[in-house]
């Protein structure tokens, strides 16, 4: 996974999807509906090229279960990716890194529901919007009634071509007092000192662009 998709793996139960299709030969468990505790963390890996309507549902029903999500996908044709996360396990957590590269028309939607006390859902979504692409990204974090002390953090950031069009639609629905409830969206721009530093190291213009893109893609902080 590291060599092909730049995704770090670790000691965990794995659930792997390639091009939207479950890969049993790369997975140690089946499905993303977790109703029993696993002694190791769970790592869901969703990779490859997508087209059409794609959906990933993650349901956590047990206490103290860590779940990690790594998504690295691209599209050359119109695509819609919907990720649904429900955490109903007290002191369980779901932390996600989502890397989207849009070469055409991409819609992405994430819905994150806290359905128990002391639940964590943190999702960091990065978008590379290529030339003449159209991207619509939305995310809704929901903290249900009587589900106190939730930790909710939903982030968007984008690196975009000047001709790309983008739309971010973040939302929160909070019905209980959270420990943390953050929601952010930002556009990444390299600073003049960063560009000068790279050029001073002997990099060409194309190499500077590649280095900046790699830095953007790999600067995740949620796990």
Image (cartoon, helix red, strand yellow):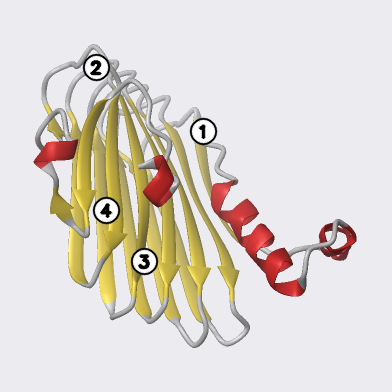
Is disc 4 placed on a helix, strand or loop? strand
Q: Identify the residue shown where x is 38% and y is 50%.
A: 4
Q: Residues within 10 Å of mark 2 (few under 14, many from 20)?
A: some
Could you tell me how far apart the alpha carbons at marks 4 and 1 are, in whole angstroms?
21 Å
Q: Identify the residue shown where x is 56% and y is 47%.
A: 218
Q: Identify the residue shown where x is 45% and y is 60%.
A: 170
136 or 182, which is in the foreground? 136
Sequence order check, earlier mark of 2 and 4: 2
Sequence order check, earlier mark of 4 and 1: 4
- In the picture, residue 113 is in which quadrant? top left
Could you tell me how far apart the alpha carbons at marks 2 and 3 are, in whole angstroms?
34 Å
Q: Residue 83 got which mark?
A: 4
Could you tell me how far apart the alpha carbons at marks 1 and 2 are, in whole angstroms?
19 Å
Q: How many marks?
A: 4
**Circle nearer the viewer, 4 or 1:** 4
Q: Identify the residue shown where x is 70% and y is 66%.
A: 207
Residue at which label 1 appears: 180
Q: How far across and down, in percent of the image, does residue 186 sit?
A: 61, 61
Left or right: where 175 falls relative to 133: left
Left or right: where 204 falls relative to 9: right
**Circle nearer the viewer, 1 or 3:** 3
Residue at which label 3 appears: 74
Residue at which label 2 appears: 63
């Amino acid at each position: 996974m590291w060599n092909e998709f730049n995704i770090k793996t670790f000691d965990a139960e794995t659930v792997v999807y390639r091009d939207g299709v479950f890969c049993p030969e790369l997975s140690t468990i089946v499905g993303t509906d977790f109703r029993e505790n696993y002694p190791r963390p769970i790592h869901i890996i969703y990779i490859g090229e997508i087209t059409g309507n794609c959906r990933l549902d993650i349901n956590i029903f047990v206490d103290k279960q860590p779940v990690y999500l790594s998504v690295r996908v691209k599209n050359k044709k119109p695509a819609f990716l919907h990720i649904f996360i429900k955490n109903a396990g007290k002191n369980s957590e779901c932390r996600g890194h989502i890397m989207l590269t849009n070469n055409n028309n991409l819609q992405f939607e994430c819905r994150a529901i806290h359905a128990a006390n002391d639940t964590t859902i943190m999702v960091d979504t990065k978008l590379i919007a290529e030339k003449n692409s159209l991207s619509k990204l939305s995310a809704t974090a929901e903290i249900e009634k009587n589900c106190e002390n939730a930790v909710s953090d939903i982030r968007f950031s984008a690196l975009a071509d000047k001709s790309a069009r983008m739309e971010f639609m973040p939302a929160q629905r909070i019905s209980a007092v959270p420990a943390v409830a953050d929601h952010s969206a930002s556009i990444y721009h390299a600073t003049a000192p960063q560009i000068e530093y790279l050029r001073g190291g002997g990099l060409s213009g194309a190499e500077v662009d590649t280095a900046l893109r790699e830095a953007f893609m790999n600067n995740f902080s949620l796990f």
